[in-house]
Amino acid sequence: MDVFEAGHQFGDYDFQLNDHNPGVSNGGIFWTVPIPQDAVSLDLSQGTAAFSLSDILMPDLHDLLTALWGGGALDGEGLPLHPVFSSTVSLQAQWFDPMSIQQTSDPVNMFAYTNARTNASIQWQSIRRGVMFQSDNGPQQVLFAAVGMESNGVFF
Amino acid sequence: MKSFAGKIQPDEGNRPAGKSAGLSRRQLLTTMGSAAAYVGLQPLAHAGQSVPATSSGAFSGSNPAPTPIPGGFNAQQAFGPRFPNKFFHLFLPGPGTEPSTIFNFQGKMAILNIHGTGIRAEFDSDTGVMVNQTFSLPFATDVRFMQGTYVGVDGLQHQGTFAFF
């Protein structure tokens, strides 16, 4: 969950202000953590879903470069990385207005995903010592949103 | 979530007082404790401290951890020499790419990739007084959740709910 200086966007990590993610687990799980079962709901027949969490503790790694190093002192060219701070994130996300059904089956990566592309929106907030960010009521650009069923690995 | 513009009154740890996400303080603390237990991280009282950037404790106290998808990207190859020469198990969101980050999984899956804007406020770390406020800063989110059956690192099937941020 990234915040950028005015006029910049995803990918402009030199102009990033916040990068909230839970890190990579020792087993290699990327920015993914278990959450309470009732934090999410998904109605396949309606093509809708919702996700709500309040004040989960999630480090602020400042930018993508620092985040992929997992924190630390220097990057690959010996330039200093930004410090990592404890922070909390709250979010409410909704998926709605389902469109056509799409099916993907990828034997190379061993996954199948049947989904409905949807519209979506998100409201979120992050707090750390000295800094607070909250999404506003401005327009949001949905680059990709979908709800569905996936099976991979032994279930593929 | 209510707008905080011009309303922030920091309290302990410079954390703004009052409600968040439409919850009372009691509800918020209860929910917070529940969520914190799931992600295995530290209490909010420690917010603001510089911390190690790892979620190694996130799966403690819950079902056995899942395993990562085999696919993904090498950060140095994808983004350049400043990035680590390390493989990460994730595909970017989009049609035809795998949305799940966990392997041997079967269940519900939702994914969104949204760009928008928000308000950023900065506070004096000693006094808690707001010293700067910037409107309409761009944000980018890639949020996903997975709920269903997975095979854990123990080789057994479990039920679980996971989120990618």
Image (cartoon, grey):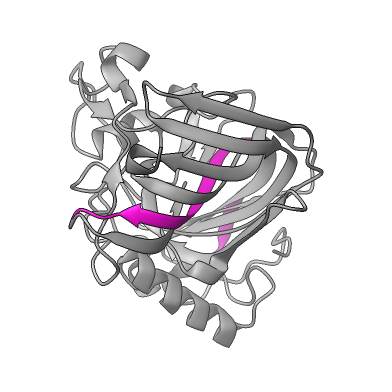
Q: Nearer the viewer, residue A29 or A139?
A: A29
Asked if the magenta segment contains residue B136, the reply would be: yes
Residue at image point 39% right, 47% down: B105
Q: Is residue A86 left or right of residue A139?
A: left
Picture coordinates of residue B162, whole percent (x, y): 43, 56
Q: Is residue A52 left or right of residue B145?
A: right
Would residue A114 be seen by someone viewing this image from the given angle? yes
Magenta segment, prevailing SS (helix, strand or loop)? strand
Picture coordinates of residue A64, whole percent (x, y): 39, 31
Picture coordinates of residue B62, whole percent (x, y): 29, 69
Rendering quarter of residue A24: top left
Picture coordinates of residue B128, whole percent (x, y): 50, 66
Q: Quadrant of the N terminus of chain B?
A: bottom right
Residue at image point 30% right, 59% down: B157
From the viewer's perspective, is residue A78 above or below residue B119? Answer: above
- In the image, farthest residue toward the front: A155
Over which residues does the magenta segment extend? B129-153
